Image (cartoon, rainbow, N blue to C red):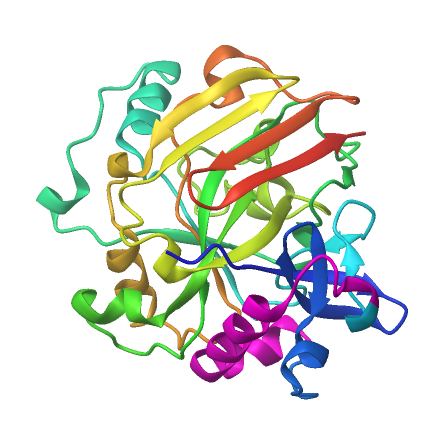
C-alpha cells in the first residue's frame, strides 16, 4: 500500500506540486525531471505516468538529501488546497443514512425511504473555487450568518476524464482522495419572505458558497491507498470535542454511483472534486454553530487530518 502524499505548496514562484517524504516536501517537477509537472493539475492531467514517476522519486528521497534536492521542511512550508483551481466542485447532498435520520428528527419529519427504492439518482450541488481554503488556515466566518455549520467529507479527486461511465468502471477515474469540510450557513438555507413552495426559496450561494466555505487538504493520497472508499472511517472535532464519528459504509449512494451519474450530466475532468456527503453529528442537530476561535479537525481514515481555525 502506498503512503505517498501529494501536496500543493507555496513557493516564491507560486503554487507548486510537491510530494511528502518523511517530514520533507519535494518539488514534483524537480524530483521527476519533468518541468511540465509544475502544478497539481499538470500532474493529474498525466496521472498514470506522473504517479509512476513520483513514486520512483519518492523512493529515492531521504531526509539527508533534502538540502541537496531543494526539499523543504513540511512543518514550516505553507500548504495550499491540494488542487488550487479545480474546474468543478461537486457536493453530494443528503447522502448518509445516519445524517438523514438526524435531519428528519430536527425537522420533525418522517424519515424518507431509501432513494434507490424510489428510482432516484444521486443529488449534487456545486461550490466554486472561491470557497477553497488551505489546510491550517484561518477561515473567516461570513458576517451575515450566525449559524455556520461543519460537515466532514471524504473527497475524491478525478484523474481521468469521465463521460457516461458505468458504475463498474467509475472508480477507475479517481486519482486519489483528500479531506474537505463543507461549511454551511444554516440560517441562509431559505430566503425569507419567499413562499415555501417557490422554486426560488433556497439560497444556495449564501448557504454553501461563501468565501472559505470549503477547507480542503492537507494532501491527496493515491486511490490505491484506499481500495474501497465505502470502508473508511470519518470523524470531526470542534475544539477537540468529537462531533461526527461515522463511516462511509453509511453512504446512500456510493462514490461509484455518484461518479457514474455526474458523468451523464458533465464530463468530469482531471482535478475535479467530488465531496461525497457528510454523516450525522452536524451542528444543526444540536443547535451548536461555529464561532471565532474554534478549531475544527476533520479526519478521514487512510487520508489524514484537515485542521482550520475560525475567525
Residue at left 59%, top 54%? 219
Above or below 163: residue 148: above
**Residue 174: x %, y % from top left:** 38, 66
Can residue 238 be seen by looking at this rendering?
Answer: yes
Q: Quadrant of the N terminus?
A: bottom left
In which image quadrant can residue 215 be found? top right
Residue at left 9%, top 43%? 117
Question: From the viewer's perspective, is 295 left or right of 230?
Answer: right
Can residue 192 be seen by looking at this rendering?
Answer: no
Above or below 293: residue 170: below
Magenta segment range?
A: 38-67
**Residue 267: x %, y % from top left:** 40, 77
User: In the depicted view, which residue is nearer to us: 262 or 303?
Assistant: 303
Question: From the viewer's perspective, is 17 left or right of 288?
Answer: right
Q: How many numbered marks appear?
A: 0
Residue at left 77%, top 45%? 75
Question: From the viewer's perspective, is 48 left or right of 81?
Answer: left
Q: Quadrant of the C terminus?
A: top right
Above or below 222: residue 48: below
State whether the magenta stretch is mostly helix, strand or loop. Answer: helix
User: In the depicted view, which residue is nearer to us: 34 or 176?
Assistant: 34
Question: From the viewer's perspective, is 307 left or right of 284?
Answer: right
**Residue 281: x %, y % from top left:** 44, 21
* Residue occupying the far front of the picture: 64
Amino acid at each position: 500500500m502506498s503512503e505517498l502524499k501529494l501536496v500543493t505548496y507555496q513557493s516564491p514562484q507560486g503554487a507548486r506540486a510537491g510530494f511528502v517524504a518523511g517530514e520533507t516536501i519535494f518539488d514534483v517537477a524537480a524530483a521527476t525531471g519533468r518541468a511540465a509537472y509544475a502544478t497539481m493539475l499538470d500532474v493529474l492531467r498525466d496521472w498514470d505516468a506522473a504517479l509512476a514517476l513520483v513514486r520512483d522519486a519518492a523512493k529515492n528521497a531521504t531526509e539527508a538529501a533534502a538540502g541537496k534536492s531543494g526539499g523543504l521542511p513540511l512543518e514550516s512550508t505553507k500548504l495550499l488546497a491540494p488542487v488550487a483551481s479545480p474546474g468543478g466542485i461537486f457536493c453530494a447532498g443528503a447522502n448518509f443514512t445516519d445524517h438523514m435520520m438526524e435531519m428528519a428528527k430536527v425537522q420533525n419529519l418522517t424519515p424518507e425511504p431509501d432513494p434507490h427504492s424510489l428510482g432516484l439518482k444521486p443529488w449534487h450541488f456545486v461550490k466554486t473555487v472561491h470557497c477553497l481554503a488551505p489546510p491550517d488556515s484561518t477561515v473567516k466566518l461570513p458576517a451575515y450568518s450566525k449559524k455556520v455549520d461543519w460537515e466532514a467529507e471524504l473527497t475524491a479527486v478525478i484523474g481521468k476524464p469521465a463521460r457516461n461511465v458505468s458504475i463498474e468502471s467509475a472508480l477507475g477515474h479517481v486519482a486519489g482522495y483528500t479531506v474537505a469540510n463543507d461549511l454551511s450557513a444554516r440560517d441562509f438555507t431559505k430566503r425569507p419572505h419567499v413562499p415555501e413552495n417557490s422554486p426560488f426559496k433556497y439560497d444556495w450561494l449564501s448557504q454553501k458558497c461563501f468565501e472559505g466555505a470549503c477547507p480542503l487538504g492537507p494532501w491527496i493520497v493515491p486511490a490505491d491507498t484506499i481500495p474501497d472508499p465505502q470502508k473508511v472511517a470519518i470523524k470531526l472535532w470542534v475544539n477537540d470535542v468529537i462531533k461526527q464519528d461515522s463511516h462511509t459504509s453509511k453512504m446512500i449512494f456510493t462514490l461509484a454511483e455518484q461518479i457514474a451519474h455526474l458523468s451523464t450530466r458533465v464530463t468530469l475532468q482531471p482535478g475535479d472534486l467530488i465531496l461525497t456527503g457528510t454523516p450525522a453529528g452536524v451542528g444543526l442537530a444540536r443547535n451548536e454553530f461555529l464561532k471565532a476561535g474554534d478549531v475544527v479537525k476533520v479526519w478521514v481514515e487512510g487520508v489524514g487530518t484537515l485542521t482550520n481555525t475560525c475567525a
